[in-house]
């Protein structure tokens, strides 16, 4: 029985733990007070379940590319609190950093700037699917200690890793 148990651990449990660690599931958010960098980005409105946001953002990337706009880092401006809103009515702006001279090709695509400002920033190194949960939990825990809660809107910027073997960094900025 012990050999069967050890075989099960090495064949199934250990690989799952290794994959979760590689994806950043055991990472922790780092919280800091800082001044954000200005962001120039193209965006569209998104209303729906935030768990579907990566797919919608990927489709928007394709639209920008078809319009010959070079999308940079993904940007999400979260407008509703997923803890307090109905899943299919969650609201955000999804987009990508774009070059300064970019002109919106349609009326549904907006070009905007987020100016530099004082922020409370949560950063985490993890996959894009896990990073938001880790970052917001870290921000929540940090604020809860002083009797505060997360204030929206927040600005999320994901910097992808340099290779398939490197996880990216997510920063979540909340204005002071």
Image (spheres, rainbow, N blue to C red):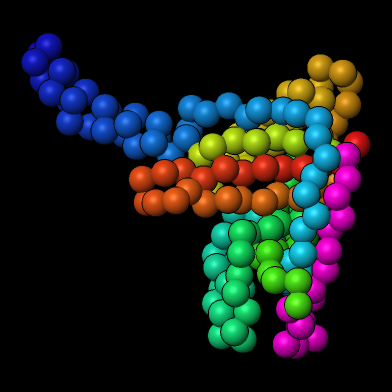
- Snapshot quadrant of residue 74: bottom right
The answer to whether residue 52 is above or below residue 80 is below
Image spot of residue 3 (x, y percent): 8, 15
In the rendered structure, the answer to whether residue 13 lies left or right of residue 153 reads: left
Answer whether residue 114 is magenta in the image: yes
- Snapshot quadrant of residue 53: bottom right
Q: Nearer the viewer, residue 83 or 32?
A: 32
Residue at x 37% of width, y 51% of height:
164
The answer to whether residue 127 is above or below residue 68 is above
Q: Quick one: quadrant of the C terminus?
A: top right
Q: Is residue 52 visible?
A: no
Q: Quick one: quadrant of the N terminus?
A: top left
In the rendered structure, the answer to whether residue 146 lies left or right of residue 74 reads: right
Q: Nearer the viewer, residue 172 or 85?
A: 172
Secondary structure mostly taken by the magenta-highlighted segment of the chain: loop
The residue segment tinted magenta is 102-118
Residue at x 70% of width, y 35% of height:
122
Q: How many marks?
A: 0
Image spot of residue 47 (x, y percent): 74, 65
Residue at x 59% of width, y 84% of height:
68
- Snapshot quadrant of residue 71: bottom right
Residue at x 81% of width, y 17% of height:
145
In the rendered structure, the answer to whether residue 95 lies left or right of residue 114 reads: left
Answer whether residue 98 is magenta in the image: no
Image spot of residue 80 (x, y percent): 81, 52
The answer to whether residue 64 is above or below residue 54 is below
Q: Is residue 141 visible?
A: yes
Image spot of residue 112 (x, y percent): 83, 68
The answer to whether residue 163 is above or below residue 32 is below
């Amino acid at each position: 029985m012990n050999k069967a148990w050890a075989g099960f651990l090495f064949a199934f449990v250990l690989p799952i733990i290794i994959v979760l660690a590689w994806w950043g599931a055991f990472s922790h958010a780092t919280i800091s007070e800082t001044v954000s960098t200005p962001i120039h980005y193209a965006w569209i409105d998104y209303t729906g379940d935030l768990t579907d946001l990566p797919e919608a953002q990927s489709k928007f990337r394709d639209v920008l590319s078809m319009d010959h706009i070079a999308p940079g880092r993904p940007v999400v401006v979260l407008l509703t609190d997923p803890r307090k809103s109905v899943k299919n009515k969650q609201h955000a702006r999804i987009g990508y950093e774009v070059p300064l001279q970019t002109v919106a090709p349609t009326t549904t695509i907006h070009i905007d700037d987020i100016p530099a400002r004082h922020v409370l920033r949560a950063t985490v190194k993890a996959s894009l699917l896990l990073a938001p949960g880790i970052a917001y939990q870290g921000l929540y825990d940090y604020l809860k200690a002083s009797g505060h809660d997360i204030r929206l809107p927040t600005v999320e910027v994901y910097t992808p890793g340099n290779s398939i073997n490197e996880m990216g960094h997510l920063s979540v900025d909340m204005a002071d």
